[in-house]
Image (tube, helix red, strand yellow):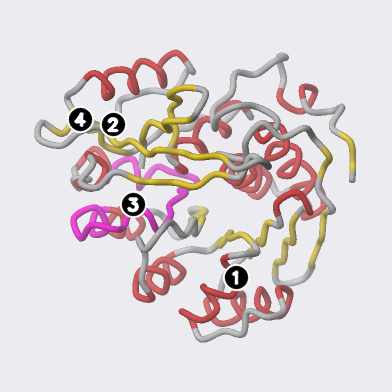
Amino acid sequence: EILWDLLPAGRQLGGAPANFAYCLHLLGNRAVVASRVGSDDLGREARDSLLRSGITDQFLQTDPEHSTGTVHVQLDSTGQPKFEIADNSAWDFLNWTDLWQSLAQSANAVCFGALAQRSPEARNTILSFLDATRPDTLRVFDVNLRQNFYSADVIHESVKRANVVKLNHEEVPRVGELLGIDGNDAIAFCREMLQKFDLQVVCVTRGANGSLLLDRQFAHEHPGFRVQIKDTVGAGDAFTAALAHGLLRGMKLAEINDLANRMGAWVASCSGAMPPVPLPGMPSALAQIQLR
């Protein structure tokens, strides 16, 4: 999904996979957004915003009937968001095309979530995209449970097609319930996920308290970084981008966990999910973040 986050401070481009692509681009990758916008002013602004960021709009479809997606975002006193997501948005009508099939076959990594699968048409397109990827493609299921826009079938079929699963600590019990896995112990949950679904990596983020990464051999916990939070919108997506970046390069879990927590903390210290880079070079821009 690509959409506009209607924040108290104003409108900012967002949508979890779009945020993911933006942060991957900042880390030096060729990242694209495969989604759908309306033939309206917000759709044109979304294209312009991506292009200004250095991301192509080649894989954005235009829907002549449905509006570009929006979500009203309310923030509590700690910067935690509450989302009200518009129905029947353009991204609910993703259309499987030859262009997207070629993109899927060429991709080194794909990130997808549960929200964009809330409509049958979009879900079928997303599953077709995943099924068209190469066997060695990194397929990252960033769960992102939102409102009631998910089901046991959506979660199960998504995990089956993924080789990396990332979720937050609040989602672990619910996902565990949907998949028939005990979610009371995060490490045991991750180990069972790895085995049951033949995954490469499972990640549980813990907000300000860092994250847990497990693969078939190792587990690594990171305590997180201390920052002044503006809002946490997109922080998890920034984390996922760094996770994919590190996995594609064969980095060790500890290195990935450090970079991913830095990325997430940096976005949380800014307003919105796609903040401009304050300094050239992402790692140097985040070097002063303090370890908790």
Q: What percent of the width, then of the height, locates residue 146? A: 43, 56
Q: Residue at x 30, y 26 (%)?
A: 58
- What amino acid is labelled 3 in the image? Ala
Q: Is residue 255 left or right of residue 32?
A: right
Label 2: element kind? strand
Q: Quadrant of the N terminus?
A: top left
Is 274 rendered above or below residue 17? above
Q: State how far apart marks 1 and 4 are (Cα).
A: 34 Å
CA distance separating discs 4 and 2: 10 Å
Q: Main secondary structure of the magenta part?
A: helix
In the image, which disc is placed on residue 172?
1
Q: Residues within 10 Å of mark 2 (few under 14, many from 20)?
A: many
Q: Which residue is mark 4?
A: 38
**Type of the residue with mark 2:** Leu
Which circle's residue, 4 or 3, is located before the other in the chain?
4
Q: Is residue 106 magenta?
A: yes
Ranked by sequence position, the earlier of labels 2 and 1 is: 2
Magenta residue check for 18: no
The residue that label 2 is drawn on is 60
Q: Assess whether mark 3 and mark 1 are in contact (beta carbons under 8 angstroms).
A: no
